[in-house]
Image: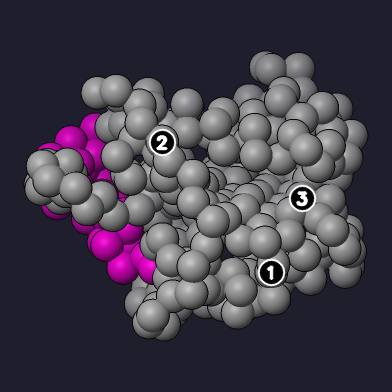
Amino acid sequence: MPLIESFEFSQPAERGPATRNTYEPAYVRSLFNRIAPRYDLLNHLLSSGIDIWWRKRAIRRLRFLQPSDILDVATGTGDFAFEAARSLSPKRVVGMDVAENMLALGREKAERKKLGHIVSFREGTAEKLPFPEDSFDAVLSAFGVRNFSDLDTGLLEMRRVLRPGGAVLILEFSHPHAFPVKQLYNAYSQTLLPALGGLISRDPEAYRYLPSTIGEFPDGEDFLECLRKAGFRSTRRLSMTFGIATAYDALK
């Protein structure tokens, strides 16, 4: 599949998105702790490796900022944090997640990649970030904000810990609209992805949950409206691979 992208400045959204996760935070934490051992394998396998390119392309959006201190929220095993460390040459990157099993794997990867002096990990929730105001030049999240228990609160917290002039960068799955990509993607995410993910992870419940959060997530202009509501400015989005994934960035 060719990689096609388009860049769009925001326009006013016509409807307000739902921003509450229907799943309890304890359930989400338990789920990601369970699937941690096979999480990276499944991410790359189920996306045919395109998720690696998505992260690289999204991180380039922050080169203008030259951030020194970076926070990666819902970091998982740290792939976005490591890409930020490689591409942006910051002094420090902090990866934060609710799932300790994910963080343990991130710490192991940091040592293997010889990035432990830059990238560190700590447990915490997006809705109550354990950092003072104005702590970071950039706050990131890849494929994690749709799991926030309260999206509005999480975005407000991300803005709070940003320094004035700092940037937020969020990479998430979105909903393709063009025929036949929309139909093929819907069939894949609703049938093949849960089946393969459940088989390989040995946790079918987890791979029913993950596609459901993609369907519920307020993507595109709806998500830009969420960013504006949280107080961000200069909101933009970059659509990739026929709209399957979108990078959103904005300034404090």
User: Quick one: SS at disc 2?
Assistant: strand
Kind of residue indicated by mark 1: Phe
Q: Nearer the viewer, residue 28 or 133?
A: 133
The magenta segment: 189-218
> Can you see residue 86?
yes
| Contact check, label 1 and label 3, Cβ < 8 Å | no
Earlier in the chain: of badge 1 and badge 2, it is 2
Asked which secondary structure carries label 1, the reply is loop
Q: In this view, does 113 lie above or below 10?
A: above
Tell me what residue is drawn at x 77 percent, y 30 percent.
88
Main SS of residues in magenta: helix
Badge 1: few (under 14), some or many (20 or more) residues near its Cα, within 10 Å? many
Q: Which disc number belongs to residue 232?
A: 1
- State which quadrant residue 230 falls in: bottom right
Q: Horizontally, is 242 left or right of 221 in the view?
A: left
Say which residue appears at 61% left-offset and 74% top-offset: 228
Q: Earlier in the sequence, mark 1 or mark 3?
A: 3
Residue identified by numbered label 3: 138
- Residue under numbered circle 2: 5
Give how far apart the Cα atoms at labels 1 and 3 are: 13 Å
Q: In which quarter of the image is the N terminus?
A: top left
